[in-house]
Image: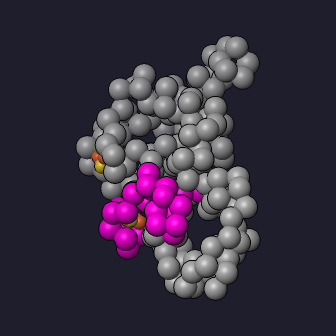
């Protein structure tokens, strides 16, 4: 089938079987390799993309659901000021992250801060609960997000939150 959708702000068209996973389409058709393939069963949370405005597992989105949709991968999100705030916040908090989970942590952070301008500790922990990373201290995630909020506030208004 022929499927048109928006990928990182650009109109794209692919030919694909209906059930091919988005994770494979991103990696094979478009060479977008920063969306990581982990469990491929929706459990690890490493394959995050923003699909129609919410964080979704790219391993669970079949091609037929892409028609008319909007997909943002980390490659697209990394062009934004929000990305810079989050990366700087994570760095200030000395948040540990590896090649598998960084994409998901950043996109989940982006979606959280889009939804809630100054999230509570509970809301932050909830936002990351679907990522199966046992290496990161959850308190560092909270600190990283709080620092990202502060940096965004300074960028937008020239003062702290
Ligand atoms: S690869 Fe998609 S949730 Fe694990
Ligand atoms: S899985 Fe990447 S730091 Fe834990």
- Quadrant that contains the N terminus: bottom right
Question: Residue placed farthest to the left in the image?
Answer: 135
Query: Residue 125 magenta-drawn?
Result: no
Q: Residue at x 31, y 43 (%)?
A: 98
Question: Residue placed farthest to the top in the image?
Answer: 159
Vertical order, 1 against 67 (above or below): below
Q: Using the rendered image of the protein, determine whether residue 112 is visible from the camera's viewpoint.
A: no
Taking depth in this image into account, of 89 and 146 the one nearest to the observer is 89
State which quadrant residue 140 falls in: top left
Main secondary structure along the magenta-highlighted residues: loop
Q: Residue at x 44, y 35 (%)?
A: 142
Left or right of residue 145, residue 52 in this image:
right
Left or right of residue 159, residue 128 in this image:
left
Query: Residue 49 magenta-drawn?
Result: yes
Vertical order, 124 against 28 (above or below): above
- Quadrant that contains the C terminus: top right
Q: Residue at x 64, y 32 (%)?
A: 81
Q: Position of residue 68 (x, y in %)?
A: 73, 71
Tally of numbered tags: 0
Q: Position of residue 154 (x, y in %)?
A: 65, 18
Q: Position of residue 126 (x, y in %)?
A: 47, 51
Q: Position of residue 53 (x, y in %)?
A: 67, 57
State which quadrant residue 110 falls in: top right
Q: Which region shows up in magenta? A: 25-50
Q: Using the rendered image of the protein, determine whether residue 136 is visible from the camera's viewpoint.
A: yes
Quarter of the image where ligand 1 sits: bottom left
Taking depth in this image into account, of 136 and 25 the one nearest to the observer is 25
Q: Residue at x 54, y 78 (%)?
A: 62
Vertical order, 159 against 96 (above or below): above
State which quadrant residue 72 falls in: bottom right
Left or right of residue 37, residue 61 in this image:
right
């Amino acid at each position: 089938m022929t499927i048109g959708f928006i990928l990182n702000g650009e109109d794209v068209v692919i030919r694909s079987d209906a059930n091919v996973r988005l994770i494979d389409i991103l990696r094979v058709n478009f060479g977008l390799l920063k969306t990581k393939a982990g469990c491929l069963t929706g459990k690890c949370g490493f394959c995050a993309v923003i699909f129609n405005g919410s964080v979704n597992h790219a391993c669970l989105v079949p091609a037929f659901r892409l028609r008319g949709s909007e997909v943002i991968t980390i490659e697209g999100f990394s062009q934004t000021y929000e990305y810079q705030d989050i990366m700087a916040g994570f760095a200030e908090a000395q948040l540990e992250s590896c090649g598998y989970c960084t994409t998901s942590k950043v996109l989940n952070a982006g979606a959280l801060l889009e939804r809630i301008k100054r999230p509570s500790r509970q809301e932050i922990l909830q936002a990351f609960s679907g990522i199966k990373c046992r290496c990161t201290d959850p308190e560092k995630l909270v600190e990283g997000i709080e620092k990202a909020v502060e940096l965004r506030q300074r960028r937008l208004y020239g003062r702290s939150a």
